[in-house]
Image: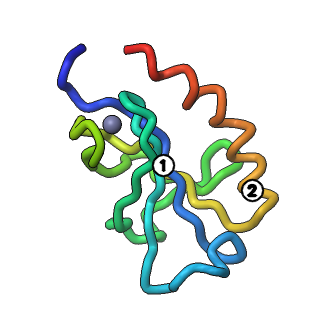
């Protein structure tokens, strides 16, 4: 297994999807492709830098992080901005297969 950073999809809840969350906390959530641990980091990039692509508002450049379980460096990309439960369902449908398939390397 190489130690170069692995790509993983991030999700950043906003609007209706983040109603029961402290507005001061604006995390990007992701799953480590190496060990499957869920992690989160404070979002760094402004929402204005996100672009509407493939039906979602996404940050295609992404952000770097590291898994707190296995310490693997992670490149979180794309980071998808999810506004409500409908988008949340579409996001899970689109990215669930992809996220499940990357654990083999
Ligand atoms: Zn990990």
Considering the image in quadrants, where does the N terminus appear? top left
Circle 2 crowding by C-alpha within 10 Å: few under 14, some 14–19, many from 20: some
Considering the image in quadrants, where does the C terminus appear? top left
Give coordinates of residue 18: x percent, y percent.
62, 74
Q: Quadrant of ligand 1?
A: top left
Q: Find disc 2 in the rendering and name its residue.
A: 87
Position of residue 50 relative to residue 7, above or below, is below
Query: Which quarter of the picture shows residue 72?
Result: top left
What is the C-alpha distance between the residues marked 1 and 2? 14 Å
Label located before the other in sequence (1 or 2): 1
Disc 1 is placed on an element classified as strand
User: Residue at point 38% right, 31% down?
Assistant: 35
Query: Which quarter of the picture shows residue 82?
Result: bottom right
User: Residue at point 25% right, 32% down?
Assistant: 5
Q: Is the residue indicated by label 2 positioned so its CB lies within 8 Å of ligand 1?
A: no
Give coordinates of residue 63: x percent, y percent.
32, 51
The number of numbered badges drawn on the structure is 2
Front residue of 79/61: it is: 79
Disc 2 is placed on an element classified as helix
Circle 1 crowding by C-alpha within 10 Å: few under 14, some 14–19, many from 20: many
Q: Find disc 1 in the rendering and name its residue.
A: 10
Q: Are marks 1 and 2 in contact (CB under 8 Å)?
A: no
Residue 78 appears in the rendering: no
Give coordinates of residue 22: x percent, y percent.
51, 84
The residue furthest left is 3
């Amino acid at each position: 297994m190489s130690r170069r950073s692995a790509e993983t999809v991030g999700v950043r809840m906003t609007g209706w999807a983040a109603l029961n969350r402290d507005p001061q906390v604006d995390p990007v959530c992701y799953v480590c492709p190496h060990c499957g641990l869920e992690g989160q980091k404070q979002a760094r990039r402004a929402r204005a830098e996100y672009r509407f692509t493939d039906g979602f508002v996404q940050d295609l450049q992404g952000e770097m992080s590291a898994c707190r379980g296995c310490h693997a460096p992670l490149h979180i990309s794309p980071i998808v901005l999810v506004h409500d439960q409908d988008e949340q369902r579409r996001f899970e449908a689109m990215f669930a297969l992809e996220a499940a398939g990357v654990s083999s390397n």
